[in-house]
Image (cartoon, grey):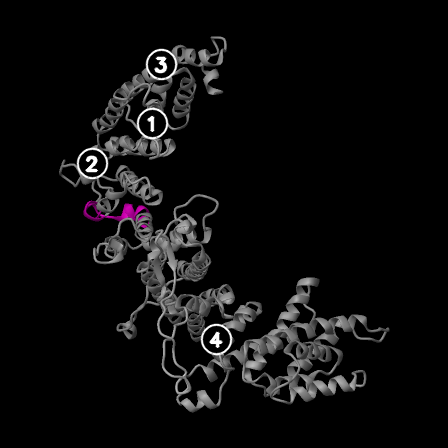
Amino acid sequence: MATIPPREYTILLTHLHKPSSSLPLQTHQSLISHFLAQTPTPTPLAATVISSPLFRPFAHAKLTTLVTAFRHAVHLRLKSLRDEETSLFTRGIRPRMTEWVRGLLKGFKGGQAVIRFVCAGGIILGLEDLKGKSGTDPVGGNVRAKTEDELIIALTEITELYGAPKHTAWEKEFQPETEHGELDVLSLTMLFAAQLLPHVFSERIKVLPLSTLSSYLMTTIETTFSSGTFLTSLPASCSSTPSGQLSLTSPTGPKQPTFPYDSPGPWSKSAPLPSALKAVTGTSLFPAVPSLSGLSARILPLLAESSPSEGWNTLEAVATRLQKLASNVENDWAQSALASIEDENDIVPDSRELAANIWTTLKTLLFMTVMLSQSILSTITYSRPVSSGPERSSTHMPTHSSLALSTLRTLSHLSFVITKFGGVTSTSSVGFAELKRVFYSALDVLSADVEASEAFVKSLDAHVSASSSPWGRSANPLMRARQAFNLACIEQLVPLLGLDTIENVVFPLCLPHLDGASHRETYESAHSVILAVFAAHARAQPDSTTVAGVKGKGTSRPTFVEKIVPFYVQCLLENSVDGKLTTSQLRLAFSALTSSASASTPAMGKFCLSSLLSMLSGLSAKEDARRRHRLRLVLVSTLSALPLAVLPDALAAVADEIRDSESKERVELAREVFKEIMENVGDREKEYCLRWWEEQREALEGTVEARNGSPPGKGALTLARL
C-alpha cells in the first residue's frame, strides 16, 4: 500500500466502518474502484467493503453502487497493468489480472450473502466488458468459474435466508432488512439477478433451486404490476365532460384531519389512478421487466431439462399466474369507460398523457407475457411430461394441450391490447412478430389434441354471452377484440371440429360479423373462418366425421356446410360493393367457395356461377361500373375452381363479359384470364381452356389491340407479355 496516498485511503476506511457517511454514494463508488484497482493485493479492502455497515440496511442505490464499484475496478485494474513499466522478467498481464481477481474473491469470505452477490456480479460484468472489447477472457478460466460459483452460492444463501416469511412483527419493525420505502430483499435480489445471471454459464445455473427461483421471479413480476390490480381505480376515475369527452379524474372528498392537533374538517383524497400507475412505473422494477422476464424464460427450459417432473409443474404454475394476472387487468379494464374509447380525441387533453401511460403499462405487460409464453411453448415442444405411474396416480400432471390452452386464454384476456398491434392475424410490418409466433405455436400444440381443441372452441363464447356483463355491448372495442381473437383461434382449429360444433358454435359466432365492414378485424376474421370451413369441406373424405365430412356413410343427405353454400354465395355478392371486401379478398373468397361447392357436386359449382352471372346482369352499366368490373374479375377467378363440366358455360360468360367491358378494362380482364389459365387451372381443365383460348384469341386480342394500337397477328405471345 506504499503507493496509495494514505490520507484518502484512510478517509475511505473511516467512512466504510461507519453505518452512515456524509459523502455521497457516487464518491464512495469512485474511491472503492480506484483503491481496489491500485493495489495488487485487494483482499483487505475487499473484505472491508463486504463487511461495511454503510451498505445496510439494503437499498437499490447502495447495491447498485457496489456493483458499479467492482465493475469499474476491473476496468481500472487492467488499465493500470497496461500502464505499468515492464521488463523481461515482468509477468504477463493476464496472470497478474487473474491473481488480482482471486485476491478480490478471498475478501468475500464470511461476508453477507446479498453484498457478496452484487459484488461478485460487478466483477463478472467487468470481465464481460473486457472480453467484449478484446474478444478474449482477461483472466484464467478457473478464476472466472470461481467468480460465477461465488455468485451462485450467494444467491442460494439469499433464497434460503429470505425465502421464509418473518414470523414476528419485531423482526420486520426493529430489524429492517431494507430501507423504508424500498423493495424487500428478495425483490431486490431478483432485480440484480436478472442483470447478472445472463452472464453465467447455464450448467452452473442448473445447481440453483430453479423452481423456487422461478417462483420468486414471478412474484417480483406480479409485484411490479400490483398483481394486475393497478387499474382497479380506473372505472371510478372515468367521467364524462359536458362536451362528451372522457376525463380520467379522481374523486374528491373531505380533507383528512391531522388529529389531535387540528380540528376535524374536510379532506381530499390523493388521486388514486395516477398514484396506482406511479406505483407501477415509478419503481425500479418496472424498467427491469424485460430482464426479469428474460431470466425467467431462460430458467424454464433448464429446469424442464434437469428435473422434468418439477419443471412441468413449474411451467404450469407460471402459465396459471400469467393467466390470473391478465384476467385481473381485463376485468378492471372492462368496467371502465376508457374501454369504449377508440379515438384519442374523445379524451380531454389533460387526461391524454395519463391514458398514454396506461397503454404503456399494458403493452409492457403484454411483452412480458409473450416472452414467458414463448419459453413455455418452446420448452414443451421439445419435451414431454413425466408419465403418471402408480406413485403419481393421485398427482395432477400438466399436458401439452393444457399449457397451450392456458397460453391462449391468457392472450385472450389481453386481446384488447393485442388489437393495438393489428391483432394476431395482421400481415403488416407493424405487427408483433413474437406475439404471432406464440399464438400460432399454442394453436399447433393444441391441435394435436382433437378433444381439447373442440372443447376450447365450445368455450370461447361463454364469457361474451352474459348480457349482464360489459361483454354484452356489441359496440364495445373490448368485445370486438375478444371476438376477433376467438375467430382467429377457430380458423386454425376448423379442420378438427365436428359438424355439430360448426353448426351450433362456429357459424353463430361468425354470422353477426359477415356484413359489419366498419370493424375490419372481426369482419375479415369472420369471413376467414367461413372460408376455412369450406376449405376443410373440400379436402374431406366422404366418411369423415369432422367438418370436412361431405356425407356420412350410406346417406346422401347434404351436410350443414353444403346447406349454407347459397347463403354465403349471396353474402359475398352483397359484400362486393365499395367499402366491403377488397377486390383481391372477394376473388379469393368466391373462388374458394366455388371450389368447395364443386367438390360436393358439379351442380353446386354451377349454382355459384349462375348466381354470379345473375348479379352481373342486374347491375347498371353506368351506376355500378366499378362493382361490375370487380365481379368480372371474380368471374375470372372462378375458372380454376369449377369442374370441367361447368367450364364451357363459365368460359362463354367470360368472353361475353370481356366484349361488353369498357375499352380501358378489357386489357386487364384478358390479362387476368390468361394468367388464371396458365397459373391456377388444373392440368386436366387447362387443356380445354387453352383450346378455348386459341379459338377466342382473335376476338380477345382484338380488344387488346384496340387498346394498345398494336398490329394484328401477334398471337398468344401478345397476351402472355401483358
Measure how far apart labels 1 and 4 are at the Cα level: 61 Å
Q: Position of residue 392 (x, y in %)?
A: 29, 73
Pointer 2 residue: 562
Identify the residue at horizontal 33%, vertical 59% (top origin): 336
Q: Is residue 558 visible?
A: yes
Residue at 34 percent of width and 15 percent of height: 660
Q: Nearer the viewer, residue 69 or 382?
A: 69
The answer to whether 200 is drawn above or below residue 591 in the figure is below
Mark 4 and mark 2: Cα distance apart in space = 60 Å
Query: Which circle's residue, 4 or 2, is located before the other in the chain?
Result: 4
First-in-chain label (3 vs 4): 4
* Element type where label 2 sits in the image: helix
The magenta-colored residue range is 489-505
- The first of marks 2 and 1 along the sequence is 2
Residue 626 in the image: above or below residue 339: above
* Magenta segment main secondary structure: helix
Q: Quadrant of residue 18?
A: bottom right
Magenta region includes residue 403: no
Q: Which residue is mark 4?
A: 187
- Calculate the distance from the C-alpha at mark 3 to the C-alpha at mark 2: 34 Å
Which amino acid type corresponds to the residue marked 4 in the rendered image? Ser
Pointer 1 local density, CA inside 10 Å: few below 14, some 14–19, many at least 20: many
